[in-house]
Image: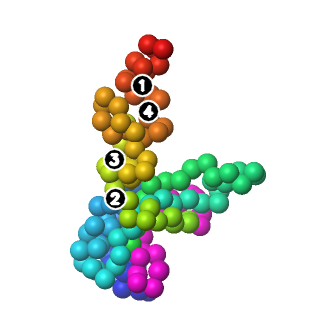
Amino acid sequence: MSKYTEYMLETFPQGLYEQWNKCKEFCAKMHRDFPELILKTGYVYSYKNIDNYGDLHKQYPHVWLETKEGEIVDPTVKQFGLLGELHYVDSKGKPFRGSCNGCGQLLFTDHPKYDAEGLICGKCKWTSPATQRESSSV
């Protein structure tokens, strides 16, 4: 067992729901304790999210750590427990922008939409009061 795995098991809760939306918080703590790890932001997906035509339907914004050798160290991997094998896509340094005011999803600079309510993801923009006002005035 690696020192990182041992640390994660001793430090962080291991339940799926206890890890939900905690990736930024847990990775920041782990990065403070292991500064040699590289903090990464981006998305994860699973082949279970790809349909018969090869289209990817769901990517999850995520924060994780990597060793200098490229090994992924993810203290919140269990929140994706039902997806199977994960594939990590680095946002290439695009900074974390914040969380969606509607659902709490993590957003990076290439993803957020703004409305009168503030930061909102693409999924929630259809249900935000500002969007409803715009669509009703058309």
Give the amino acid type for the residue marked by disc 1 in the picture: Thr
Q: What residue appears at the point 28 percent right and 80 percent down from the top-left corner? A: 34
Give the amino acid type for the residue marked by disc 3 in the picture: Ser
Tell me where the magenta segment starts and ends, as one range. 66-85
Decide if residue 81 is on the left or right side of residue 64: right
Q: Nearer the viewer, residue 47 or 109?
A: 109
> Can residue 106 be seen at all in this image of the molecule?
no
Give the amino acid type for the residue marked by disc 2 in the picture: Pro
Give the amino acid type for the residue marked by disc 4 in the picture: Lys
| Chain-order first, disc 1 or disc 3 | 3
SS type, badge 3: strand
| Chain-order first, disc 2 or disc 4 | 2
| Chain-order first, disc 3 or disc 4 | 3
Q: Nearer the viewer, residue 93 or 55?
A: 93
Report the residue marked by disc 2. Answer: 95
- Compute the Cα span from label 2 to label 1: 26 Å
Q: What residue appears at the point 51 percent right and 60 percent down from the top-left corner? A: 44
| Percent x, y of residue 42 | 44, 60
Contact flag, marks 2 and 1 (Cβ < 8 Å)? no
Report the residue marked by disc 1. Answer: 131
Contact flag, marks 2 and 3 (Cβ < 8 Å)? no
Contact flag, marks 1 and 3 (Cβ < 8 Å)? no
| 88 shown above or below 98 | below
- Compute the Cα span from label 1 to label 3: 18 Å
Residue 127 is inside the magenta segment = no
